[in-house]
Image: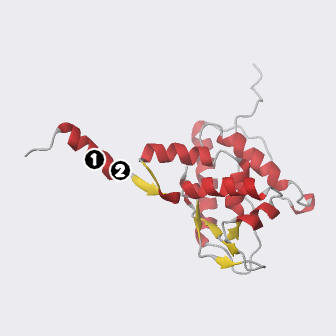
Amino acid sequence: MPISVRGQIEFCQSLRRVTYGGGVERDEQQQAEFAARALNSPLRLRILRLCGFDARTNKELAELLDVNPGTMLHHVRTLVEAGMLAPEPERAGRRGAREVPYKATGLSWRTSLGENQSVVLIETMRQQLEGVDPADVRFTWLGLRLNAEHKAELDRRVFELAIEFKERGPDPDGDAYSFVAVTHPDLNPRPD
């Protein structure tokens, strides 16, 4: 008996449905939208940063980011459901309590943050810099006047350099650093 058109469509759609963190099943579009919403938070981006190299528990994250543990649990669960954090094997805490450490999956690196990603990233960077000794911050800020070809080259080369260092993996004896590169239109028009 031939399969109906509706049956064929449902079968094809079922092939594109994937179970993500937290056992939630979504199609690719739903997952992309959920992931973008999950990453649309400076706090969640900071959680991912803290779990990038080392697995951390909800309690550790709450202490490091000075956030209520209940609030932290909500954000951690959202990131797990989005596939951005993965639980590691349980371990015993200081008083024998069950603790679950979480490690970033790296999926956020390949996920679009959505329309206001620049605002979220700049706010995340601002929060990350709070408490950092200004003498430890290195930056370059300059104005450039580039044609479209040279602007594309600058963006490509900076991105390639960042990818090169990321793909090297963490240095076993290294310290953690944050790297941010921003290009934006400068409100500096040419005089007529």
- Which element is circle 2 on? helix
**Residue type at tag 2:** Arg
**Residue 99 position in % (x across, y down):** 68, 72
Q: Which residue lies most toward the front here?
A: 96
- Identify the residue under disc 1: 12
Residue at x-position 54% and y-position 45% = 34
- Which element is circle 1 on? helix
Residue at x-position 19% and y-position 38% = 5
**Residue 169 position in % (x across, y down):** 62, 72
Dot label at residue 38: none
Is 170 situated above or below 83?
A: below
Name which quarter of the figure residue 174 lies in: bottom right
Q: Nearer the viewer, residue 53 or 152?
A: 53
**Residue type at tag 1:** Cys
Residue at x-position 64% and y-position 54% = 158
- Identify the residue under disc 2: 16
Is 80 situated above or below 101?
A: above
- Tell me if I can see residue 53 in this picture: yes
Determine whether, in the image, residue 68 is placed left or right of residue 91: right
Kindly check if marks 1 and 2 are in contact, taking CB atoms under 8 A apart as contact.
yes
- Tell me if I can see residue 177 in this picture: no
**Residue 190 position in % (x across, y down):** 75, 25
Residue at x-position 77% and y-position 45% = 123
Q: Nearer the viewer, residue 186 or 78?
A: 78
